[in-house]
Image: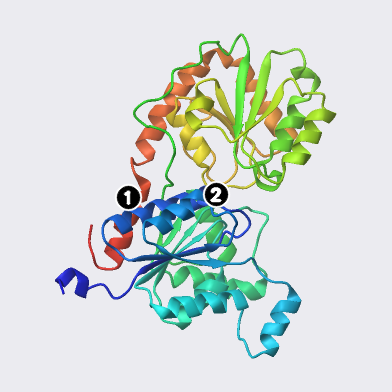
């Protein structure tokens, strides 16, 4: 046995708490890190939500040799009651996860949460078993606060982590208030992106002054992404005689409502639902990203648009404005409301002839802030945690 092998007390176990969708932007960081670790010889296991068919990246993990444990969504109260009557402790889904993890105790657990902080149900289980963990929180919103009886558990979930990672300064600042934690074991981490940082697409041949092409990119989820606010704003009288088109890219359970809003506003010829589209194809034709989010972390879509040399109009929510300079590389709406979005859109319309120059400034700014390979950097951090260095 080599010295390196002798220092490996167990696998790195990735646990994704996302159970509402087969995949999302919050999954990309841990996925890239897991694949990087596997290629360097580190044993990796992972637990994700159960979906049929499996997402292609879950299949890729399996093909790379990652042992997967699939979890169902939270069961109803009757199933939980039956579990309790049969002598089970805690949540049945977590009990199954705990049994699986005990088979090969981890050297480190990496919990990826699509929301504000790691869920205490998970971290309490890790702590009870003496398992070290790090956590990544990918989003937050200021209208969510823990109930008073939950605050101590959330605080413990953060403070007992080896490192608590956030994807934006705003998310971290808000989480500190929500859970009232003061520990300094926090760090900002960046997500992977899906564009070539060295080869931005050319600016569209048709100038924005002839017809402005706006893109709204992301999951069709009105609760978080706010496409309804954008559609309603663009249905106002001031936009009817202007030359513009909005292409909405992505899919999700909000699609039927969005389709109805477009029909009700009479915008079928001007607001188009494009579904999932290759990112380079989006920015080959679009002048501007409009991101009317209600809650976020720091959207990959903003990074990709800026890296593609496109300015961004977005809401002052979470990390949305952290890479932008208002009026220089984009436009920031004060809130995800019709009145505030309308003000930002009006400023943008008046400056539409300068969008190409703003896009160049956006690209220069994002290249300074976003590393070349965030997934590999995260894998390096994990290797250091388990004593394997870089």
Q: Which numbered disc flags the more N-terminal residue, 2 or 1?
A: 2
Per the image, the residue denoted by label 1 is: 376
Residue 148 got which mark?
Answer: none
The secondary element bearing badge 2 is classed as loop
Residue 329: x and y in percent read 49, 26
Q: Residue at x 37, y 47 (%)?
A: 374
The residue at the far right in this view is 264
From this view, report whether residue 206 is shown above or below residue 51: above
The reply, left or right, for residue 26 in relation to residue 385 is: right
The reply, left or right, for residue 67 in relation to residue 98 is: left
- Crowding at label 1, few (<14), some or many (≥20) Cα neighbours within 10 Å? many
Q: Residue at x 77, y 31 (%)?
A: 232
Residue 70: x and y in percent read 54, 66
Instruction: Indicate how the structure is coloured in the image.
Output: rainbow
**Residue 288's image quarter?**
top right
**Quadrant location, the N terminus:** bottom left
Residue 337: x and y in percent read 72, 37
Mark 2 to mark 1 CA distance (whole Å) = 19 Å
The reply, left or right, for residue 75 in relation to residue 36 is: right
From this view, report whether residue 16 is shown above or below residue 32: below
Which residue is at the front of the view, 341 or 105?
105
Per the image, the residue denoted by label 2 is: 24
- Crowding at label 2, few (<14), some or many (≥20) Cα neighbours within 10 Å? few
From this view, report whether residue 338 is shown above or below residue 327: below
Task: Answer yes or no: is residue 281 visible.
Answer: yes
Residue 75: x and y in percent read 69, 71
């Amino acid at each position: 046995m080599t010295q390196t092998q002798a220092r490996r007390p167990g696998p790195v176990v990735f646990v994704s708490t996302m159970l509402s969708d087969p995949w999302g932007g919050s999954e990309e960081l841990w996925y890239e890190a897991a694949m990087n670790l596997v290629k360097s010889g580190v044993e990796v296991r992972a637990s994700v939500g159960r979906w049929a068919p499996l997402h292609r990246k879950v299949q890729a993990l399996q093909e790379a040799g990652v042992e997967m444990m699939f979890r169902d969504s939270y069961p109803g109260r009757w199933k939980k009651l039956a579990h309790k009557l049969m002598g089970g402790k805690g949540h049945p889904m977590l009990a199954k996860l705990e049994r699986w993890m005990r088979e090969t105790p981890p050297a480190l657990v990496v919990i990826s949460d699509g929301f504000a902080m790691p869920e205490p149900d998970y971290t309490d289980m890790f702590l009870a078993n003496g398992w070290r963990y790090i956590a990544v929180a990918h989003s937050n919103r200021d209208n969510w606060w823990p109930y008073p009886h939950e605050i101590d558990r959330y605080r413990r979930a953060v403070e007992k982590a080896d490192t608590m990672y956030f994807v934006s300064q705003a998310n971290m600042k808000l989480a500190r208030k929500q859970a009232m934690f003061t520990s300094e074991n926090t760090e900002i981490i960046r997500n992977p992106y899906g564009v070539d940082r060295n080869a931005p697409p050319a600016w569209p041949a048709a100038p924005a002054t002839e017809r402005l092409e706006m893109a709204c990119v992301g999951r069709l989820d009105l609760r978080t992404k706010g496409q309804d606010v954008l559609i309603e704003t663009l249905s106002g009288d001031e936009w009817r005689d202007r030359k513009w088109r909005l292409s909405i890219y992505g899919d999700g359970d909000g699609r039927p409502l969005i389709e109805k809003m477009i029909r009700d506003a009479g915008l079928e010829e001007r607001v188009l639902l494009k579904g999932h589209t290759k990112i380079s194809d989006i920015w080959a034709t679009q002048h501007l990203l409009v991101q009317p989010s209600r809650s976020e972390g720091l959207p990959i879509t903003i990074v990709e648009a800026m890296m593609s040399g496109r300015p961004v109009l977005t809401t002052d929510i979470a990390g949305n404005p952290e890479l932008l300079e208002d009026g220089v590389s984009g436009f920031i709406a004060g809130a995800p409301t019709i009145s505030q979005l309308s003000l930002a859109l009006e400023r943008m319309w008046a400056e539409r002839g300068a969008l190409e120059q703003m896009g160049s400034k956006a690209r220069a700014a994002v290249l300074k802030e976003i590393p070349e390979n965030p997934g590999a950097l995260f894998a390096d951090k994990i290797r250091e945690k388990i004593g394997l260095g870089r």
